[in-house]
Amino acid sequence: MPPQELLARPQWRRTGDTRFPVAATVDGRSWVLRLNSFPDHPLWTLFVDGAARFDTDGTPSTWGQPLDNTAPPLDTATAAEVLAPIRNFAAYGSEAGDPCDNMFCCG
């Protein structure tokens, strides 16, 4: 069974962070997408309430266009709050204790 998050319709908001560019609140939970070094790694990693849920090579159609520049920005304080639990997970795999150390894709 696919993850339930693939069916959700998040309303993305820009965070101002290049590695974690968008966030949304879905059913009271904080979602953040990490933009990975594609194609060396999956395109996205979804974090829900600070925990990694799964990687995906594409964007589910229900998610719309996460990188749409017309999406409204989060205010600075909210962006800092939602990014705080995952700030140390910028490198692909770091959330699993195995960060990518390849200079070309994660350097």
Image (spheres, grey):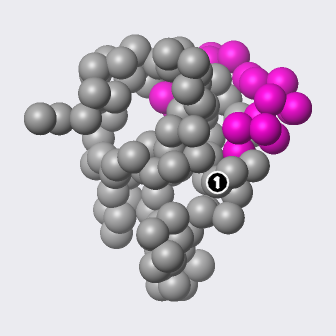
Residue 32: which quarter of the image? top right
Q: For label 1, count other residues whose C-alpha is less than 10 Å away and answer few (under 14), some (14-19) or many (20+).
A: many
Residue for point 48% across, 84% down: 102
Q: Quadrant of the C terminus?
A: bottom right
The amino acid pointed to by label 1 is Ile
Secondary structure found at label 1? helix
Residue 74 position within the rendered picture, expressed as x and y whole percent measured from the top left: 75, 24
Residue for point 67% across, 29% down: 14
From the viewer's perspective, tell me whether residue 33 is left or right of residue 79.
left
Residue for point 69% across, 16% down: 72
Residue 33 position within the rendered picture, expressed as x and y whole percent measured from the top left: 51, 41
Residue 91: which quarter of the image? bottom right
Residue 14 seen anywhere in this rendered image of the structure: yes
From the viewer's perspective, tell me whether residue 12 is left or right of residue 75.
left
Residue 90 position within the rendered picture, expressed as x and y whole percent measured from the top left: 61, 62
Residue for point 46% across, 79% down: 98
Q: Quadrant of the N terminus?
A: top left
Which residue is situated farthest in the right direction here?
A: 77
- The relative height of residue 49 versus residue 51 in the rendered view (above or below) is above
Q: Is residue 75 magenta?
A: yes
Q: Is residue 26 magenta?
A: no
Residue 68 seen anywhere in this rendered image of the structure: no
Residue 23 position within the rendered picture, expressed as x and y whole percent measured from the top left: 60, 31
Query: On the image, numbered disc 1 is attached to which residue?
Result: 86
Q: Report the magenta residues as a range.
A: 66-83
User: Which residue is nearer to you in this view: 26 or 56?
Assistant: 26
From the viewer's perspective, tell me whether residue 105 is left or right of residue 75.
left
